[in-house]
């Protein structure tokens, strides 16, 4: 259902508040550059430090500005099943095309607990849902078998896989319904996951070079493997740069260097170390971003 180059968009702040004007401009920059979809309020959107009012506001602004030009998958996950249901219901009422639900963090649920968590949200909320597995952030790794079982539920339509485990991705693609979308959640593995049958990527790097990410996906789906590989190799350095420090510190710093947002974070995230800023600036210059 969901495919192509999808941007996990940052949440710009100004003077401690959500910067609505900059967010709307970022959304249009993404769409005009050929991106297929936008994910507000994901990890890259600093969802963990947004208030519930801000969380809903960012989703509402995104849906309003997109105006149906691309799909919107709203980040609605939580380590509380009840809260995830509430956020997902809001996304549906606001008009989102889908919801992205991170594995519960800190709780460290069992695989049975993960299944029951996602099943409860799926049964409570009639909106297409994408699972999100990123154990480096959550301390919880969802097994391929759990994803495959959840893929049998009608409203669960995909998974964002950011474990770095290509064997797991292969097993999920092989054993899930053909219309189930395995989406890369780690930019450096976008092309390998596509080659296994993945349908796209929810990307951090796309915030900075959406045109290149969209071109790579277009090349792949147009069966131009050589061009897709060429673009993927070209993007490796900027993928690395986006993780010089904890995401979304580098990507927001990059966007600030590009003049698109104010360089502002929510504590406990903070500005980059001077040496990493220089490295990031050098990479951005090499790509013609600044």
Image (cartoon, rainbow, N blue to C red):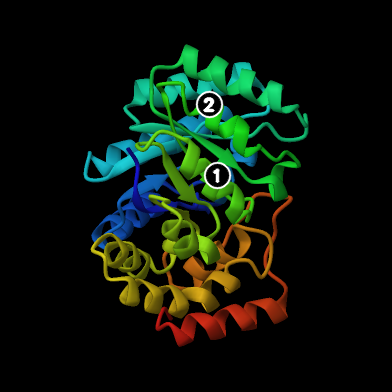
Splitting the image into 4 quarters, where does residue 201 fall? bottom left
At 46% from the left and 45% from the top, the residue drawn is 182
Residue 262 appears in the figure: no
Label 2 residue SS: helix
Quarter containing the C terminus = bottom left
170 vs 62: above or below: below
Rendered residue at 43%/67% (across/down): 208
Residue 20 screen position, x and y as percent: 40, 46
Label 1 crowd (10 A; few <14 / some 14-19 / many >=20): some
Comparing 113 with 210, the one in front is 113
Residue 59 in the image, given as x and y percentages of width and height: 42, 35
Residue 232 at x, y = what percent?
Answer: 43, 73
Say which element carries label 1: helix
Find out whether the residues at labels 2 and 1 contact each other: C-beta distance under 8 Å: no
Out of 267 and 34, give the one closest to the viewer.
34
Please give the count of numbered marks on the rendered protein: 2
| In this picture, residue 97 sits left or right of residue 247 | left
According to the picture, the residue beneath numbered tag 1 turns out to be: 171
- Quadrant where the N terminus sits is top left
Tag shown at residue 150: 2
Where is residue 258 shown, x and y percent of the image?
44, 73
Query: In this orientation, does residue 229 appear?
Result: yes
- Residue drawn where x is 38% and y is 32% of the image: 98
């Amino acid at each position: 259902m969901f495919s192509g180059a999808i941007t996990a968009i940052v949440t710009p702040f100004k003077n401690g508040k959500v910067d609505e004007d900059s967010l709307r401009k970022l959304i249009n920059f993404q769409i005009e550059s050929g991106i297929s979809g936008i994910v507000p309020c994901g990890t890259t959107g600093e969802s963990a430090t947004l208030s519930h009012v801000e969380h809903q506001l960012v989703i509402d602004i995104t849906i309003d500005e997109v105006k149906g030009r691309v799909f919107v998958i709203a980040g609605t996950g939580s380590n509380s099943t009840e809260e995830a249901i509430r956020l997902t219901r809001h996304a549906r009422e606001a008009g989102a095309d889908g919801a992205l639900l991170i594995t519960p963090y800190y709780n460290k649920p069992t695989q049975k607990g993960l299944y029951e968590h996602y099943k409860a949200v799926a049964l409570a909320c009639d909106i297409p849902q994408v699972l999100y597995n990123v154990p480096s952030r959550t301390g919880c790794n969802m097994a391929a078998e759990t994803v495959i079982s959840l893929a049998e539920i009608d409203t669960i339509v995909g998974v964002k896989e950011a474990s770095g485990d290509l064997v797991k991705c292969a097993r999920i693609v092989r054993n899930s319904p053909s219309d189930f979308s395995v989406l890369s959640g780690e930019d450096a593995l976008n092309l390998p996951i596509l080659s296994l049958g993945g349908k796209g990527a929810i990307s951090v790097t796309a915030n900075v070079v959406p045109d290149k990410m969209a071109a790579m996906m277009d090349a792949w789906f147009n069966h131009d493997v050589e061009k897709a590989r060429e673009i993927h190799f070209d993007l490796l350095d900027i993928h690395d740069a986006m993780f010089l420090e904890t995401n979304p510190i580098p990507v927001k710093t990059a966007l600030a260097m590009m003049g698109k947002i104010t360089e502002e974070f929510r504590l406990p995230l903070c500005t980059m170390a001077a040496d990493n800023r220089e490295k990031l600036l050098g990479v951005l210059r090499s790509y013609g971003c600044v």
